C-alpha cells in the first residue's frame, strides 16, 4: 500500500471520484461493540483511548457545554444508533479540519466552525467523517500504520492542534484511498438527506474553500492548507457533490448554528488573523460580510487584515472598513486602537489621537494602554 494512503483518516475532505450506486444501496451497520482488549483492534482502540484522554485535558479543547452538546446533537441526527458511541470535541485550531478515530472520538476544529455558514454545511463535513467511521476506514488506516511502525506519526497528526506546523506536510504523504473518499462522500450525503438537511450545501463548503485558495494562486495549496494537502483543489469535486445532491431539499439550520457559534466568534476571528495569511482571510471575511453586512466584527477583522497586509491600496481599504465599523452599534473597542495605528501610519495625527483617546476611554486597563499613552505623549 502506498505511504500516502495513511493520513486521510484525519482530514475532513470530499470525494474527487464520480458517484456510484452506494448512495442508494448503502445501509448503516449495527453498532460496533468494543473489541477484546487482547485483540489487535482492541490494542488500537486502547491507543486512541489514550489520545482521547489527552484531548480532554488539552488547553486547545473548547469546553463550553452548549457548543459541545450542539455538535454531539448534529452527530446524533446523522448517526442514528451510533450516536451513543461518538464523542465530539471542539478544538481551538484556526484551520478547516475535522477527524474521527475508530473508537468514536471526533474532533471539530474552530477554523471549520468559522468557515461553514449553517448547520447543513457543518453536517456535510461531520457526515463525511461518520462515513469513514461507519465503513471502518480509519481502523484500516491505523492497522496499516501499525504494520509499518508509523503509528507514532498518526498519533502526532491526530493531536495536530499542538503541532499544526507538521500537519500539512504529513497530510501530503498520507491519505485515504479514492474509493474510501468516494464512499464517505456518498454516505455523508445520504446521512444529510435522511436527517433532513439540504445536501446541496455540501458542494458550497468545497466551493468556498477553493475561493480562499485562489487568493494565493502563486503558492502551492498543498503547503498552505490542511484540507488540500492530501487532495488538490478541483472544480470536479464540487460538481460531484452537486450531482450527489441533485433533486434534494432540506433545512439549512442557519439560526441555531449562529446562536451556538457566535459566543466564540471573536476568538475564532483573532485566531484566523494570527495565522498571518491575510489574502485568504480577506476572502473569507468578505464572504462573511456578504451574509452579515452589519457585523462590526467582520468589518473590524477585514480592516485589520488589510492594514497588516499593507500592499498597494490596502491602507485605504482598511480605513474604509475600520471607519464603517466604529459607526455601528456594538463596536469593538479594539477597532479604535486599530484605527489609531492606521492613522499614525498615514500621518494623520489628529484623528489618530481621537481614535486612541476613545480606545483608552473604553479600555482603560488594557495591556497596551501605557504604550499608547507614550505615543500620544511623544506627539504632543
Image: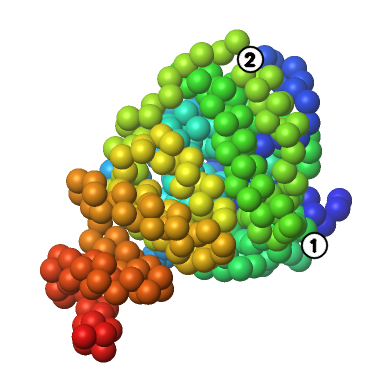
73 up-or-down from 193: above or below: below
Residue highlighted by disc 1: 148
Drawn side of residue 247 relative to residue 57, left or right: right
Q: Looking at this rendering, what residue extends furthest in the right direction?
A: 1
Front residue of this view, candidates 288 and 6: 288
- Quarter where residue 44 is shown: bottom right
Q: Is residue 350 in sight in this rendering?
A: yes
Q: Residue at x 72, y 59 (%)?
A: 219
Of marks 1 and 2, the one in the foreground: 2
Answer few, some or many: residues within 10 Å of disc 2's Cα (few below 14, many 20 plus, some between 14 and 19).
few
64 up-or-down from 205: above or below: below
Q: Residue at x 62, y 37 (%)?
A: 206
x then y, percent, for residue 306: 48, 59
Residue 206, numbered circle: none
x then y, percent, for residue 284: 51, 46
Question: Separation of disc 1 and disc 2 at Cα?
Answer: 41 Å
Q: Quadrant of the C terminus?
A: bottom left
Residue highlighted by disc 2: 246
Looking at the image, tell me whether mark 1 or mark 2 is earlier in sequence order: 1
Q: Is residue 127 in sight in this rendering?
A: no
Amino acid at each position: 500500500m502506498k505511504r500516502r494512503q495513511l493520513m486521510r483518516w484525519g482530514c475532513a475532505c470530499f470525494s474527487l471520484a464520480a458517484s456510484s450506486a452506494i448512495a442508494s444501496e448503502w445501509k448503516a451497520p449495527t453498532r460496533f461493540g468494543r473489541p477484546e482488549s487482547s485483540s489487535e483492534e482492541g490494542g488500537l482502540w486502547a491507543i486512541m483511548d489514550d489520545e482521547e484522554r489527552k484531548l480532554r485535558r488539552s488547553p486547545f479543547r473548547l469546553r463550553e457545554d452548549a457548543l459541545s452538546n450542539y455538535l454531539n446533537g448534529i452527530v446524533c441526527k446523522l448517526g442514528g444508533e451510533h450516536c451513543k458511541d461518538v464523542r465530539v470535541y471542539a478544538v481551538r485550531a484556526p484551520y478547516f479540519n475535522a477527524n474521527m478515530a475508530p473508537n468514536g472520538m471526533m474532533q471539530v476544529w474552530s477554523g471549520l466552525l468559522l468557515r461553514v455558514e449553517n448547520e447543513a454545511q457543518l453536517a456535510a463535513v461531520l457526515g463525511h467523517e461518520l462515513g469513514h467511521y461507519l465503513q471502518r476506514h480509519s481502523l484500516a488506516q491505523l492497522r496499516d500504520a501499525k504494520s509499518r511502525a508509523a503509528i507514532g506519526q498518526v498519533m502526532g497528526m491526530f493531536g495536530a492542534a499542538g503541532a499544526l506546523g507538521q500537519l500539512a506536510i504529513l497530510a501530503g504523504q498520507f491519505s485515504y484511498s479514492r474509493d474510501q473518499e468516494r464512499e464517505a462522500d456518498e454516505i455523508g450525503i445520504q446521512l444529510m438527506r435522511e436527517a433532513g438537511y439540504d445536501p446541496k450545501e455540501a458542494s458550497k463548503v468545497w466551493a468556498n474553500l477553493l475561493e480562499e485558495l485562489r487568493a494565493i494562486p502563486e503558492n502551492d495549496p498543498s503547503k498552505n492548507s490542511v484540507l488540500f494537502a492530501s487532495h488538490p483543489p478541483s472544480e470536479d469535486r464540487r460538481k460531484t457533490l452537486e450531482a450527489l445532491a441533485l433533486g434534494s431539499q432540506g433545512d439549512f439550520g442557519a439560526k441555531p448554528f449562529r446562536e451556538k457559534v457566535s459566543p466564540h466568534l471573536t476568538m475564532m476571528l483573532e485566531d484566523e488573523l494570527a495565522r498571518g495569511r491575510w489574502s485568504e482571510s480577506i476572502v473569507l471575511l468578505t464572504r462573511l460580510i456578504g451574509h452579515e453586512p452589519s457585523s462590526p466584527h467582520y468589518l473590524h477583522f477585514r480592516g485589520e487584515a488589510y492594514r497588516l497586509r499593507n500592499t498597494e491600496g490596502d491602507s485605504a481599504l482598511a480605513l474604509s472598513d475600520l471607519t464603517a465599523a466604529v459607526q455601528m452599534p456594538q463596536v469593538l473597542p479594539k477597532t479604535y486602537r486599530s484605527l489609531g495605528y492606521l492613522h499614525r501610519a498615514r500621518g494623520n495625527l489628529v484623528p489618530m489621537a481621537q481614535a486612541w483617546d476613545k480606545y483608552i476611554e473604553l479600555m482603560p486597563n488594557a495591556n497596551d494602554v501605557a504604550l499608547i499613552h507614550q505615543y500620544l505623549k511623544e506627539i504632543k
